[in-house]
Amino acid sequence: MIEKIKVKTVASYDSTGIEVNLDKINYIFGSNGTGKTTISELLRNSDNQKFSSCNIEWRPGGSDFDIFVYNRHFVEENFNIRNDIKGIFTLGKESTEILTLIDEKRKVAEKHQERIGNLEMNIEEKKGQIENLQTWFINQCWDLKQKYDEVFEEAFSGLRNNKRKFMERCLVEATNNNNEIYTYEELKNRVDTVFKNSRDKASPIPVLNYDNSLEKHSIFQTKIIGKKDIDIAKLISELNISDWVQQGHIHMEGTDGICPFCQQELPRDFKGKLEMYFDETYMEQIQILNSSIEDYRENTIGFFEKYNFLINEDKPYINKEKIESLFELINSAYKENLQLLEKKRNEPSISVELNSIMSYIDQINSEIELANVQISELNRVIDNINEESDELINDVWRFIVKENKSDYEHYNSNFRRDSRALEGMKRSKEAQKGHKKRLEEEAIDLQNKLTSVLPSIHEINVLLKSFGFTNFQLAESNEKGNYKIVRENGEVANETLSEGEKTFITFLYFYQLINGSNDHDKVNTSRIIAIDDPISSLDSNILFMVSNLISNLKKKVRSNDSNFKQLIILTHNVYFHKEISFNKGHGSQKQLDETFWIVRKVDNISYISDYQENPIKNSYELLWKELRENPNSITTPNIMRRILENYFKFFGNIDVNEIVEEFLDEDKVVCNSLLSWANDGSHHINDDLYVDSNQELNQIYFNVFKQIFINSNHYSHFVMMMGEFQMEGEKESIEHEATKEIQLAMEQTAANQE
């Protein structure tokens, strides 16, 4: 069945449009021009481009139904000036056994259709579960992307703004990526090398070279003293005053034999003995000492000058802080050694041992070697940058796969299970469709043995005669499978039919068509029926006959054995609506399988309202309700005319013209305009007249309409029906209950007139 109709951006429906939720039996009431035919035409011709913004939503398993629509377009297409009318194929009644077999196959096919519908609902439910599972996994994968995006953005290139594509890449990598697993820190370092660094190669850092032999020069540890075989040597040695004597010897020059320390006269040969003590060997050692000290100083200063670039320049992969610290230690050791050497220079007889800086240099060289390894790797990567980039990206995704392992396993196991279930349902659905198609084809083969257009001619002619149409009938056309309309003398009657005759035979043709088909192979399909105002130009007797046919159709829709599944009735006629909505045993009370709607047009835009009970309970009451709820409708003046006719003419035989005489001259014109319909007669079904929508004119009519009730002393009835409160001093003596009795009497009178 159809579950919902959406109509928008077509005819008088705006871009918001309407939604109509349907059940088995559906009634849509509305005045002429409000938009009913647009709804029926959507059902009849939904593929038309003008309905591209509209939609028909089906219940699961219901889209295979055929839709039959009766409206004015159906009449125009099937009954025009051409002679022939398409024949209707129906099942003959010659073989009860074959008919029973066809019916059995149709019922079994319907059961398959029910199973198809259930499977479609289960398929949609399972699809929803899979979609929810995918949404969950997409979010889990995206959380990983967000977590590592800043570091691994190059590896995620092309996927960083698309959650679903990122998830799909995770699935592919989980299946195909078997690379070695690296830690996050390892990958981060490689990212810095491959993606972050410059593409320029780096030069290796030279290691530090230092001649440490000067630190170990023997002269620094040699005690430099004078000649031992001089008689004063023993005294100098015992007193250990060699350095003091040597200083005195230097200062003896120019003292004229006086001791530079005690100012006593020196022995006559003392100076000679000192010169013998500080002989040539001693002076050579002093000279070696001084030159060695200078060599050490120059060598160390040269070392600093050569390798200061390690602390003054930024070199890749070097721990600059550590290098600076080691250089400070070297400099400190150097300064201490200079102090030791200066002491040795002043006191040649002492032995000194310099602090070695080689341990610090070795540490610096170790750092340089580590840096050079990374520089070598960098240069290798630059030489093979494309291969390295691809390898790193694969390793990053292997890391993501590892991080995502538990979520992937949960997703994969559930996805496989649900997918298998979904595929099983789809296979079952296709199998059911195959069984259904086979049964339908078998039923069609059986139908072809019995179907004919002739029974339809007979059925329609019987109905025509039973309803009093005896001056024309259907006959088989010269073109096989078609009909023609003929008079009793055999003359073709298409062009001479009255509107009422044309309308009635068109509806009978439609009524017979829904029990068969113009297509030989579609005689007994499941179908939905929509009927739009079938009683235009018909008198009241035919109205009740048409109502009776539709009531029989309602019974078939409600029967589980029928191929009629849904009925949609659209009308503007309150009497017809009242008849077709009547349910035996329940009256006009709404049933569980029914829906009631009223479509209205306000400011040239159509709207629709649904009702929890039948809104068309009484034609007179409906007129007042329409006047209350839609006072600016294009049909408002006609509604007020019909109220006055019902109330004053049918009830009490009150002469409204006498009431008009009480109005002022300028208001009499309006009164007469409002009442001009009366001479048209009131013993037939009146369609709504079309009047231009004019709010100011409607208000003028309404004021006169109200004044008529006041002047006739029936204002209390006006107040009751309009739901207004009377102003103080305006209350009439008529009690509410009495007014209700008047209304009931009026309704009874109207019923008798009908």
Image: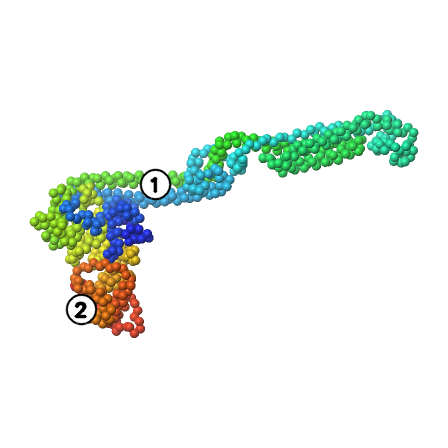
Measuring from the top left, give residue 654's x and y in whole percent: 19, 69
Which residue is found at the position 71% from the left and 31% from the top?
A: 298
**Residue type at the position of mark 1:** Leu
Measuring from the top left, give residue 448's x and y in whole percent: 17, 40
Residue 422: mark in rendering? 1
Q: Quadrant of the C terminus?
A: bottom left
**Residue type at the position of mark 2:** Asn
Which residue is found at the position 21% from the left and 71% from the top?
A: 661
Identify which residue, 397 or 318, lies in the foreground. Answer: 318
Query: Residue 361 occupies which quadrant of the picture?
Result: top right
Q: CA distance from mark 2 to mark 1?
A: 74 Å
Number of other residues with Cα within 10 Å of mark 2, as a class: few under 14, some 14 to 19, many 20 or more? few
Up/down of 619 relative to 345, above or below:
below
Number of other residues with Cα within 10 Å of mark 1, as a class: few under 14, some 14 to 19, many 20 or more? many
Q: Is residue 225 visible?
A: yes
Which residue is found at the position 15% from the left and 40% from the top?
A: 449
